[in-house]
Image (cartoon, rainbow, N blue to C red):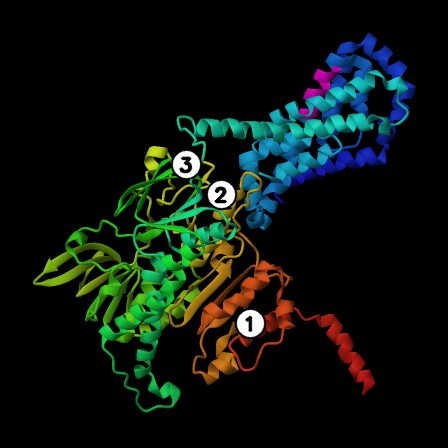
Amino acid sequence: MNIKKLILFMVIAALMASYVVFDLGQYLNLAYLKEQLAAFQALAASNPAWVLGGFFLLYVVVTALSLPGATIMTLAAGALFGFWVALVLVSFASSIGATLAFLASRFLFQDTVQRRFGERLKKINAGVEKDGAYYLFTLRLIPVFPFFVVNLVMGLTRIRTWTFYWVSQVGMLAGTAVYVYAGMELGELDQLSGLLSPDLIGAFVLLGLFPWLAKGAMAFIQRRKVYKGYRKPKRFECNLVVIGAGSAGLVSAYIGATVKARVSLIEKDKMGGDCLNTGCVPSKALIKSARLAHIERVPARYGFQRITPEFDFADIQARIRAVIGKIEPHDSVTRYTALGVDCIQGSARIVSPWEVVVDTSAGERRLTTRGIVIASGAGPLVPPIPGIEAMDILTTDNIWELNTLPERLLVLGGGPIGCELAQSFARLGSVVTQVEMLPRLLPREDEDAAALATAGLQASGVTVLTDHKAARFAREDGENVLYAAHQGSERRLPFDAVLVALGRRAYTEELGLDALGIPTEKNGTLAVNDYLQTRFPNIYACGDVVGPYQFTHVAAHQAWYAAVNALFGRFKKFQVDYRVIPWATFTDPEVARVGLNEDEAREKGIEVEVTKYGIDDLDRAIADSADYGFVKVLTPPGKDTIVGVTIVGEAASDLISEYVLAMKHGLGLNKILGTIHIYPTRAEANKFAAGEWKKAHQPERLLRWVERFHGWQR
């Protein structure tokens, strides 16, 4: 605490101590007020200006210090000054005093509270920023809720001071009027509980409902404003139209069909979207084949002198297509039609909040619908690097069409997709160079996790060039070349094929969103609220077109909220929950995480303990010659509550699930330690990580007494 805070704290403490030491509370009770009422009235009549000024200052001090007695002083004001004078006097004095208490709380404690609990308060801060005036107005209209608590707690939030003042001024006016009026009848009051009659409490409850009714009315007006110029159909062909049949769209349609809604699902390309056709499924099939091919380089690891896998790259690509074909029925038109979904092949365009036009091979089809879910997904981002237009670039969209293995493959991008494909092609025999403009690969992961993944890529034959920025492409002497900027100079990198893996961009074109005024974020994703609504309350969006996590499992997670809110939002809406989101990078070793990592905790100023268990100590990992990697768990100091986990190693994407379950349901490391894990399995690494935390938190004093007990027993 700095010197200014210390001085203010000591002044406040001294004033509050004086109140207790000198028993000033005896002058702020109903009995004393009634006894001295005549004397106070005579004083007010002879010196009105001095009494008014002194009363005002005293009221401000009592309120600012959060001392008991404000209610008595309000009653006294009504008895001494009459209704209108007392109402104005108390209204301004109470609001000024409340604001001083608010500012003192903010000055003394806000930084500390926000620093220590900033992550947990993020949602509250956002809510206060958006609807803080409504929250405060409601609290001010219910006088049975301690006003001094409101002052102090609101000081810890980020509500603006001016907003706090004027809302307090307006919000407390009704309650002040009631108490001032009661003060005018002071002689008939025997105790303060008389103020809280059922009729009076009912009046306050109605006042408390006012801001919510006002909010509902404002929402109604806003809806009328948003829909102005559009004519709502009297009847609808569909309950829900879903645009896009990737993970998000399929789940949305499935949920709608399950609850017997009439759903139309529109897809212009292939059912299953990127995940099935160009993303998760083909890439994991490729990774498996590449891992088997890599055994040729490490036969001694498994006790062999030589392992010689023979393959043709075209056969591997054929296997990948066969894998897609085997999974395809899960996402097929046949399956969804059987569920009751109207599957439409064509390009969708939203022409009004309740109408979607589909361009099909048979012509144009117009659908009317109560709700729309936009799940159009995302695709590879190709930045405008000079000369790139002259290159036949590869992306995750077309790399699966290759039947010949590139001899020299250049990979742009050090994120998960770039790392997975760079390692796979290197293991299959390509000479792979990976270029990343940042200082390291996998920048969203901790440095130690990224370092192990990088070592795995290099061991597979990938030349990793970090801190290299693609400057320009060129065609020189019949050869493709990339010039990469590095430490003030350019590096010449020849290649036969280039894979661009520099992120993904949301598909929002051709949907008619500009004409409807549906905005996008800076990164191109659709702007939605916590309920996944766009600017039109009946149009929702989910999946990669929204973010913030462009993963298949997150798209499916969002789809539940989008579908349920679109179908039943008039009665109850649900805010999408991002508290426990896991993900994995399927390199060798795999990198999986959930919750915070060390870098994020440091950036956000969140104090954590780090517990780390090395998988090189795990029996099953040693037996499998996969004894590398670690399990790292983040917990609050002294507690076993799990706030984040990073796992690096073989099958890390599977091992992380135990921690996802624990975090979702509030289970700590003690529960994981007390759970039986089969021996020998990789899952024991989770238990041993919990054991490392337990060893670091042994009750040393108790153990010393136990040691003495055993000595006495001997």
Find residue 566 and name its label.
Answer: 2
Q: Residue flagged by tag 1: what amino acid is it?
A: Asn
Neighbour tally class for label 2: few under 14, some 14-19, many 20 plus, Cα within 10 Å = many
Mark 3: secondary structure: loop
- Of residues 451 and 313, the one nearer the viewer is 313
Earlier in the chain: of badge 3 and badge 2, it is 3
Residue 433: image quadrant is bottom left
Q: Quadrant of the N terminus?
A: top right
Q: Residue at x 82, y 12 (%)?
A: 44
Q: Quadrant of the C terminus?
A: bottom right
Query: Of circles 2 and 1, which is in front?
Result: 2
What residue span does the magenta drawing correspond to?
A: 86-95
- Asked whether, in this view, residue 157 is left or right of residue 565, the answer is right
Query: Of circles 3 and 2, which is in front?
Result: 3
- Reply above or below: 521 against 661: above
Residue for badge 1: 686
